[in-house]
Amino acid sequence: MIPKPDSCKDCFGACWGMQGFVPASGLGDNGVLILGEAAGENEAIQSQGFVGKAGFYLFQNLQRAGIDREGFKIDNVIKCQPNKNFLACAPYEKEVIAKCQPNLQATIDEMKEKCRQNGKTFTILTLGKVAFKAVMGYDDKHPVMKNDYIAYVHRSDIYNCFVVPAYHPSFLMRGNTNLMPVLQFAAKRALEVAEGGFKYAEPDYLLDP
C-alpha cells in the first residue's frame, strides 16, 4: 500500500478513514483515459486501479469485445478508498473530489501531451455518475443527468476533451448484466473518437416561408 502524500493531510478523507493511495496506471497509448470513481479495497492494497472484482469483470468483458486493457490509462476521480466504499451522494463527495482534482489534472495533462505526440484525440471514458459529473462539472440536478446520456459523445469544457460516459462495472454486477453491451459499445466509441476525432453533426434547416 502506497502511503498518502503530504497533499492529502488536510483532506477530509484523511481524517475520515479513507485508505491507500492509488496513482494512475497504464500507458495510455490508445488515447483513452478510463476514469472510475474511487479505489476499492483491492485497489487500495495493491495501489493499482481496477484490479478487484469490478476491474476483473470490466476487462474480462471488454476483452470479449476485442478490447484489451493494455493501451488505456486508468485512474479514479479520487485516489483513495472511501470509508465503506461510500462516495456517491455522500455529504463529503464534492469536498474530497475538489481536493483530489489536482491529481486528476496531472493525469489529464500527461495524457494530452502523449496524445499530441501520438496523433490521438484525448478522450475520457467515465465509469459511473460520479466520474462523469466530475469531468463535466455537473451536479445531480443538471438536465443532462436526467436524460439518456450514456454512451453519447460529450464535450468537457473544463478539460477541453471528449467524454464518453458508461455504466460502472460494479453497477452491472448488481443484477444489471444485460447492460454490459452498452459499456462495451461506449468503450469502442471512446477508442474511435481517440483514433479519428469527432465532429458533431450540423444539419441544414430549410425554413418554409
Image (cartoon, rainbow, N blue to C red):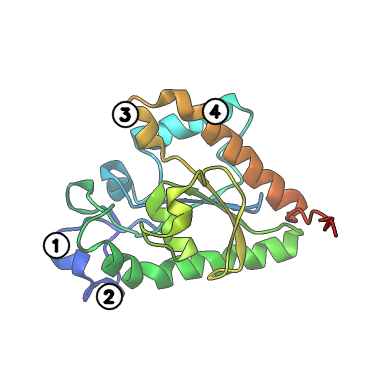
Residue shown at the point (56%, 33%) measured from the top left: 184
- Which badge, 1 or 3, comes first in the chain's sequence? 1
Residue 24 appears anywhere in the view? no
Res. 179 visible in picture: yes
Mark toward the start of the polypeptide (2 vs 4): 2
- Is 59 drawn above or below residue 85 in the view shown? above
Q: Which residue in the protein does label 2 denote?
A: 6
Q: Characterize the local packing of mark 2: few (<14), some (14-19) or many (20 or more) Cα atoms within 10 angstroms.
A: few
Foreground: disc 2 or disc 4? 4
Q: Residue at x 34, y 71 (%)?
A: 98
SS assignment at label 2 = helix
What crowding class fits label 3: few (fewer than 14 Cα within 10 Å), some (14-19), or many (20 or more)? few
CB under 8 Å between discs 1 and 2: no
Q: Position of residue 146 (x, y in %)?
A: 43, 49
Tell me residue 57's x, y (percent): 42, 30
Q: Could you tell me which residue is drawn at 14 percent across and 62 percent down?
A: 16
Q: CA distance from mark 1 to mark 2?
A: 16 Å
In the rendered structure, the answer to whether residue 31 lies left or right of residue 57 reads right
Secondary element type, mark 4: helix
Residue position marked by numbered label 3 in the rendering:
174
Q: Are marks 2 and 4 in contact (CB under 8 Å)?
A: no
**What is the three-letter code of the residue carrying label 1?**
Trp
The residue under label 2 is which amino acid type?
Answer: Asp
Give the vertical position of 10 relative to 136 (above or below). Answer: below
The residue to which callout 1 is attached is 16
Which numbered marker is on residue 181?
4
Amino acid under label 4?
Pro
